[in-house]
Amino acid sequence: MTFTEYQAKSRLTAIYPNRDNNFIYPTLGLAGEAGEVAEKIKKIIRDKNSFVSPEDQQEINKELGDVLWYVAQIATELKLSLDDVAENNIAKLASRLERNQIKGNGDNR
């Protein structure tokens, strides 16, 4: 599945207030879901000495899917293509790597 296909299919399940004119709702959802991923990882570190079981992988997979869903909705609300977002991100990272700027601070390095 491409990002474009995912974005279109995920939109069919986007039921929230003022859809198509509400980037705030999915942004808040993204923050919550990213927190859930972080919480699961934190507990793996704390309770399992960083051992990730197959069950943990499945649970994290589900949460990452939720993160992706919210990213797709934000992109759609802002009329952005997820394919473009992904391509632009890879180009930015490749440029940083080429210029030895992967490490460091700031978006525009």
Image: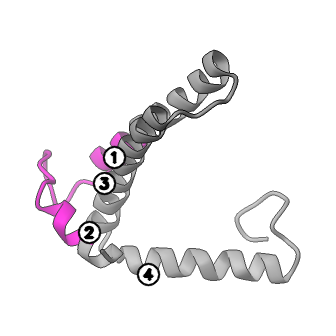
Quadrant where the C terminus lies?
A: bottom right
Residue at the far top: name it: 47
Give coordinates of residue 98: x percent, y percent: 82, 83
Tags 3 and 4 touching, CB below 8 Å: no
Alpha carbon of mark 3 to alpha carbon of mark 1: how far?
Answer: 5 Å
**First in sequence: mark 1 vs mark 2:** 2
Residue 99 visible to the viewer: yes
Crowding at mark 2 (Cα within 10 Å: few <14, some 14-19, many 20+): many
Q: Is residue 62 above or below residue 82?
A: above
- Frontmost residue, 92 versus 58: 58
Kindly identify which residue carries mark 4: 84
Going by the numbered disc 1, the residue's amino acid type is: Asp
Alpha carbon of mark 2 to alpha carbon of mark 4: how far?
Answer: 12 Å
Kindly identify which residue carries mark 3: 69
Quadrant where the N terminus lies?
A: bottom left
Instruction: Tell me the element at label 3.
Output: helix
Position of 6 with respect to 37 (left or right) is left
Instruction: Tell me the element at label 2.
Output: helix
Alpha carbon of mark 1 to alpha carbon of mark 2: how far?
Answer: 13 Å
Alpha carbon of mark 1 to alpha carbon of mark 4: how far?
Answer: 20 Å
**First in sequence: mark 2 vs mark 4:** 2
Tags 3 and 1 touching, CB below 8 Å: yes
Instruction: Tell me the element at label 1.
Output: helix
Going by the numbered disc 4, the residue's amino acid type is: Asp
Kindly identify which residue carries mark 2: 7
Kindly identify which residue carries mark 1: 66
Which residue lies at the image location 69% right of the left edge and 74% below the top edge? 93
